[in-house]
Amino acid sequence: MIIEDEKLICNELSKLLENNNYETIILKDFKNALNEIFKVSPDLILLDINIPFINGEALLQNLRKESNIPVIMVTSSNSETDEALSISYGADDYITKPYNPNILLLRIGAVLKRTKTNYNANKLTYKDLKFDITKGIIKKNNIEITLTKNEIIIFAYLLNHQNKIVSRDELITAIWDTADYINDNALTVNINRLRNKLKEIGYENAIDTRKGMGYILL
């Protein structure tokens, strides 16, 4: 989804993306931007800061209260303050205009790979649980558990490989770029947090550790 009020830029972005096998939709109703996002449930949003009715950073902040849809800020603002604010509000990347089209495509591909929004469906099931990837929520009856971005990626990856052993290296690659991965203990911490959240809704032993091999979702 392209959220940009300059028609020429919208059309250029849309053409660039469609020529590279992405489907695009351009936001028209800025007044109800958040509702329009949830109607479409896009895999990724390209968001300008200076848009009508609501500042792009404020829209991002509101979006993050309900959803983990990946967002790349594409803006003419090269202010370090705007970039810092955008990242602190939950932007997945920040690129300034005028941008190199090839660099933008690489950034989009990297974010999609990192956030794993290229799964076949955004809504998955595990036994009697419903897992909404875009909202980062696991739901059981009237109970909802909210996951962090890393926990979403781990659970989605394990779910898409259910009953198969997934190595630590696979999960590390799914979550972090090599440059961002610092501590070997980081994956263990994220796995344990996810286990504790699953335990809260009755699935204490859902993720099993296979020593020397990795993890398996039973």
Image: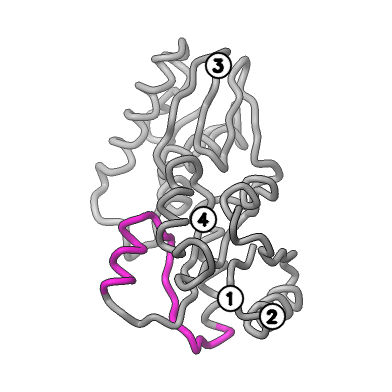
Q: Amino acid at mark 2?
A: Leu
Q: Of the residues under marks 2 and 3, which one precedes in the sequence?
A: 2
Vertical arrangement, residue 214 with respect to residue 73, above or below? above
Vertical arrangement, residue 140 with respect to residue 102, above or below? above
Q: Where is residue 107 shown, x and y percent of the image?
A: 51, 72
Q: Of the residues under marks 1 and 4, which one precedes in the sequence?
A: 4
Residue 98 within the magenta-colored segment of the rendering: yes
**Circle 4 sits in a helix, a strand or a loop, which is it?**
loop
Q: Which residues are magenta?
A: 81-102
Q: Residue furthest top?
A: 202
Residue 70 got which mark?
4
**Circle 1 sits in a helix, a strand or a loop, which is it?**
helix
Residue in front for this viewpoint, 135 or 202: 135
Q: Amino acid at mark 4?
A: Pro
Q: Where is residue 13 shown, x and y percent of the image?
A: 65, 78
Dividing the picture into quarters, in which one does residue 134 lie?
Answer: top right
Vertical arrangement, residue 206 with respect to residue 53, above or below? above
Residue 183 within the magenta-colored segment of the rendering: no
| Residue occupied by mark 1 | 105
| Residue occupied by mark 2 | 16
Residue 140 got which mark?
3
Q: Of the residues under marks 1 and 2, which one precedes in the sequence?
A: 2
Residue positioned 39% across, 80% down in the render: 77
